[in-house]
Image (tube, helix red, strand yellow):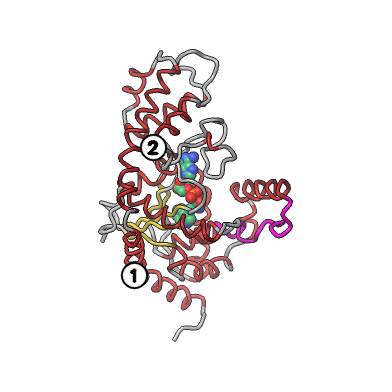
Amino acid sequence: MKQRVFSGVQPSGHLHIGNYLGAIKNFVKLQHDYECIFCVVDLHAITVYQDPAELKAKILEIAALFLAAGIDPKIASLIVQSDVAAHAELAWMLTCVTPIGWLQRMTQFKAKAAQWRDKIDTEQDDQLASVGDGLLQYPVLMAADILLYQAHIVPVGDDQAQHLELTRDIAQRFNSLYGDTFVVPATKLPSVGARVMGLDDPAKKMSKSAQSANSYVGLLDPPATAKKKIMRAVTDTQPAVDFDNLGPGVQNLLGIFQAFSEWPDDRMRNHFHGKRYGDLKKEVAEMVLSHLEPFQERYRQITADPSYVAGVLRSGAERVSPIANDTVRTVKQRMGLYTE
Ligand code: TYM
């Protein structure tokens, strides 16, 4: 039996090359050797307010982007989280075995709560004037996503590594309280591209929710826009690439190039050492566009038939539901909840 892989992407903001290099590129590779489930995690997106019409459109957009990236729905299952009710059901059961202190320690919770408070302060919107409980519970839902399918491997970018640690802790705690139930999953980070930094500020990670669109190259950015953003990327005061003294902006650009090209370290060094920053940026832009343009062409073909993506998601949900329902039944039995 093949080992199982699970991962998810939120349908919020614009998917960018960081999401692609950190996670989706690995999804495409893994699908041939593992039984893969890839999920549009819409329940995670609503941990902060989303415009309902935009959210609905975004869910289909992310699913189409998965397909455009090369995920083959014949071999991998593509699903939407809220379409399989067992995600939310298991999340509640796991909430009840998770100490609140574990959640309050999460770096992303602290950062997102602060970010949301700033937004509330600027927008003066009383209706949204609180940090929702969902933001705190977020990693438990993520643990439920993974444990529901007894996934062995979870390909993610570096910013999700702490949530994966927590998932392992929750699985182990459940197993020790109620007997061996869950597979304890392993994190899979890419060797290059696990943490792509913002182009305009290499001290911060490239982010969908960044204030400035110059932080990221969106997977659906028009090629001219993508090129402009790369040409404007922050470097440093040196004139040229010096591998013995790389500033964070230059390191980030080299990392983006290497993650797309898959060149080995020595080839990177031989090619770029001493190169002026203007030329480096031009080559990075060319490398990114050589992937982005065919990708966007596939995206246009996939979305030309709106019923296609919906059909893929329906059959994905049908395929995975028996696994999810099995796990929930076992968990209910172990916890003493009512089952017939
Ligand atoms: P999300 O939607 O923020 O990001 C999707 C994936 O992209 C990776 N990523 C990055 N990788 C490299 N550089 C970056 N700058 C960068 N930004 C984002 C993320 O690490 C992630 O792998 N909580 C998750 C979604 C989720 C999930 C799951 C993932 C929900 N349930 C179960 C795995 C398994 C999230 O918000 O990812």
The segment highlighted magenta reads: 124-139
Observer-side mark, 2 or 1, equals: 1
Is 126 included in the stretch rendered in magenta?
Answer: yes
The vertical placement of 101 against 339, above or below, is above
Give the residue type that dot 1 points to.
Answer: Glu
The vertical placement of 198 against 181, above or below, is above
Q: Position of residue 113 (x, y in %)?
A: 65, 50
Q: Which residue is mark 2?
A: 191
Q: Position of residue 93 (x, y in %)?
A: 54, 70
Q: Position of residue 104 (x, y in %)?
A: 64, 54
Q: Residue at x 33, y 22 (%)?
A: 266
Res 84 quadrant in image: bottom left
Q: Residue at x 43, y 74 (%)?
A: 330
Give the residue type that dot 2 points to.
Answer: Ser
- Return the mark for residue 136: none
Q: Position of residue 217 (x, y in %)?
A: 46, 37
Q: How many marks?
A: 2
Is 134 included in the stretch rendered in magenta?
Answer: yes
Q: Residues within 10 Å of mark 2 (few under 14, many from 20)?
A: few
User: Of helix, strand and loop, which mostly describes the magenta segment?
Assistant: helix
Q: Which residue is mark 1?
A: 318
